[in-house]
Amino acid sequence: MLKHKGCVVWFTGLSGSGKTTLAVALKKHLDRRGCHVFVLDGDNVRRGLCRDLGFSKADRDENIRRVSEVAKLFADGGLVCLTAFISPFRAARARAKRTIGPGRFLEVHMAADLSVCETRDVKGLYGKARAAAIRDFTGVSQAYEPPAKPDLTIDTARISVRRAVADVVALLKKRGVLAGRL
Amino acid sequence: MLKHKGCVVWFTGLSGSGKTTLAVALKKHLDRRGCHVFVLDGDNVRRGLCRDLGFSKADRDENIRRVSEVAKLFADGGLVCLTAFISPFRAARARAKRTIGPGRFLEVHMAADLSVCETRDVKGLYGKARAAAIRDFTGVSQAYEPPAKPDLTIDTARISVRRAVADVVALLKKRGVLAGRL
């Protein structure tokens, strides 16, 4: 019935690197083509399932563990699940990949530089982090470990959202997730 | 595109009351009619998202809190989500209803008597509970609080699975979740 296989596209990158922007644009693109797509991000997870968690390393790891378990269920249900979380730690992402299954986990690194993200500062978070009003802020007071071998790297400072959507769609076709004709 | 609205059908009842059996049969029935259905139950939740939780009252409440948050996401994604958990406590189910939204939460009470469930004892759990090898076992060493006003009550000792499926489908049509022609 569906035009795709269940899978998870895992966006990782700094706050302000464009994860949710790209996930939402990709969902819109795929929805129009009859795909069934769901976006998991801070908005619908941090306020619900993970409202009991903070931003320490342990809490971030538990957040990513729960997100990966839920993303797995969506993939089991046949959906294309897009996750948009900073997910700064390599080991937590590796565990997510094992949970979901390597064959249906696609890691996309949103590789915008810290200076670019900080200039954007859409939510005013970098300003607060620099003023030390937010602790454990990735890139400022906590590490971001970039993927060693991502399935795709997107430099959002250089390419448009439209082009980024096309790049992810091409990846999904190449990996046999999406039917070639879409 | 879809033939239904996103919603959650929440099955509650003792171990052995037929929750998963009915959920799986209902999914099969609806799948054939082009609906998009997902079943959340102990098998895919207790071994994954909630593997850190036990069966004390506090842990059961947290289990049901997480299940309700995930079920909400599936309903947000437009799926018919069937949850099959004992969910023994009234307050936890009331909170699940608030989380998911009263208009798309349907509570189905699997009202088989304890003696019937214990006779079935599919997984051999009642035997272990009576031998005190399992603590906090619902109906034996922990309370089950039946729903005061369920949307539907099914006495699985008296009606067949087929009839139970028809009853739930009728409820879904009545509430406008499923298109009437299905």
Image (cartoon, coloured by chain):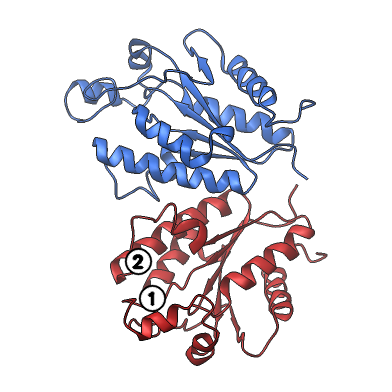
Chain colours: A red, B blue
Q: Is residue B37 above or below residue B51?
A: above
Determine which quarter of the picture holds residue A166. bottom right
Residue displayed at 51% across by 61% down: A43
Query: Mark 1: which amino acid?
Result: Phe
In the displayed structure, does residue B158 sit left or right of residue B116?
right
Tell me the element at label 1: loop
Subunit bearing disc 2: A
Residue B113 place in picture, x, y as percent: 38, 11
Residue displayed at 58% across by 17% down: B164
Q: Is residue A129 left or right of residue A117?
A: left
Q: Are marks 2 and 1 on the same chain?
A: yes
The quarter of the picture where residue A138 lies is: bottom left
Distance Cα–Cα, label 2 vs label 1: 8 Å
The x, y position of residue A113, in whole percent, is 51, 90
Instruction: Give the residue furthest to the top.
Output: B158
Q: Dot 2: few (<14), some (14–19), or many (≥20) neighbours within 10 Å?
A: many
Q: Which residue is mark 2?
A: A61
Q: Work out whether residue B35 or residue B70 is closer to the camera in this orientation and state it.
A: B70
Q: Tag on residue A89?
A: 1
Sequence-wise, the earlier of marks 2 and 1 is 2
The residue type indicated by label 2 comes to Asp
Find residue A75 and report its horizontal and vertical position in percent.
Answer: 57, 54
- Contact between marks 2 and 1 (CB within 8 A): the answer is yes
- Give how far across and how far down residue A14 sits, in percent: 48, 80
Count of numbered labels shown in the rendering: 2
Which residue is rendered at x = 24% and y = 20% of the image? B140
Q: Residue furthest right?
A: A181
